[in-house]
Image (tube, helix red, strand yellow):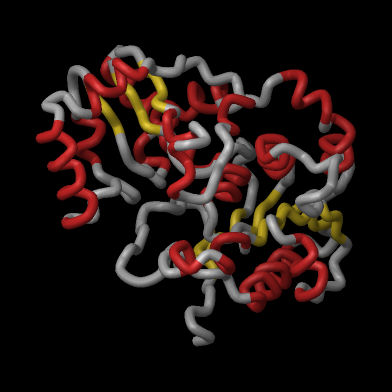
Amino acid sequence: MIIVRLNGGLGNQLFQYAAGKALAIKNNDVLKIDVTVYDQAANQKQIFRNLDITDFLISAPQASVNEVLSLKYPFGSISKFFKVINQKLFSRYYVDWHPEILQKKGSIYLDGYFQTEKYFVENKEAIFKEFTLQPRLIQEIQSNIEEIESKKTSVSLHIRRGDYADDPKTSKLHLVCDISYYERAISFMLERFPGLHLFVFSDDPDWVREHLPTSAPLTFVSTGKGDKNRFRPSQELALMSKCHHHILSNSSFSWWGAYLNSSRHKVVLAPNVWNKGSSPQPNVLPMDWLAFPVLQDGK
């Protein structure tokens, strides 16, 4: 049995699940998910996230508490000690590409972020099937899908702020893409696709309205947090994937919005810097995506 720990927002959940699924396929084994972090009490130590991955047609069941403990801490307190040492001392969070993960055999507990398609690219078709939105949720956004598909050239624009800008702990690790990055990315797309229509996705749409100058026609898909008609994150992700081309922020959410677009002709612009400081992710972008320059500290 393989158990993968889900942690963080929807984009992270998808990366974690995909890595676990790929290993399960490789080993011809059963995959289960550890969702204990999404318990309200357990989630108090970090920014609360919902288990949004269950909006998709995933096949892996949830692991029981006993199953999690038996694989996560097979040697009790000794296992807990070595886990702390690995993460705190050696910073082994398995964010980038670690090929040894796919060499594991037997009963396995996976705990990491696994933010590269290298873990699952060979099983891409199977992953896409599992990351299909539930029919009732698709039905709710069908008119929005038709609006996107009615445009000759649709481009998703994702601007991530939220905890990147407001939470001191998060902002130490994740840069906020400068507004000029988005302006230059839009200009690049306009040169290639003069008749494009932007579909804007953001966790801070009011800020985007105020600070993003562009003459391109656009539609705001994301609305304010208090809007009763607000889409679910899974639905926004599905709508993003329906666009022809994509401008990303340094966010696993928009990464998946672009990745789930199966078109061979899509153009994807992504920041050439994903994280701050000493945590580069050289494998985060697929080879056919364009790494677009983003400013750091105003430079």
Instruction: Pick out the residue farthest to the front.
Output: 41
- Residue visible at 48% across and 79% down in the picture: 296
**Location of residue 121 (image quadrant):** top left
Instruction: State left or right for residue 107 relative to residue 186.
Output: left
- Residue visible at 85% across and 38% down in the picture: 144
- Residue visible at 19% across and 30% down in the picture: 103
Instruction: Pick out the residue farthest to the bottom.
Output: 299
- The answer to whether residue 154 is visible is no
Quadrant in which the N terminus is drawn? top left
Q: Which residue occupies the foreground of this view, 39 or 174?
A: 39
Height in image: 53 above or below 65?
A: below
- The answer to whether residue 213 is visible is yes
Height in image: 295 above or below 65?
A: below
Instruction: State left or right for residue 136 relative to residue 15.
Output: right
Q: Please state the horizontal and vertical placement of residue 241, each as a whole percent of the image.
A: 67, 40
Q: Which residue occupies the foreground of this view, 31 or 247?
A: 31
Q: Please state the horizontal and vertical placement of residue 16, each as a whole percent of the image.
A: 41, 35
Q: Which residue occupies the foreground of this view, 186 or 52?
A: 52
**Location of residue 263 (image quadrant):** top right
Height in image: 190 above or below 24?
A: below
Instruction: State left or right for residue 57 relative to residue 134.
Output: left
Q: Please state the horizontal and vertical placement of residue 114, each as a whole percent of the image.
A: 36, 43
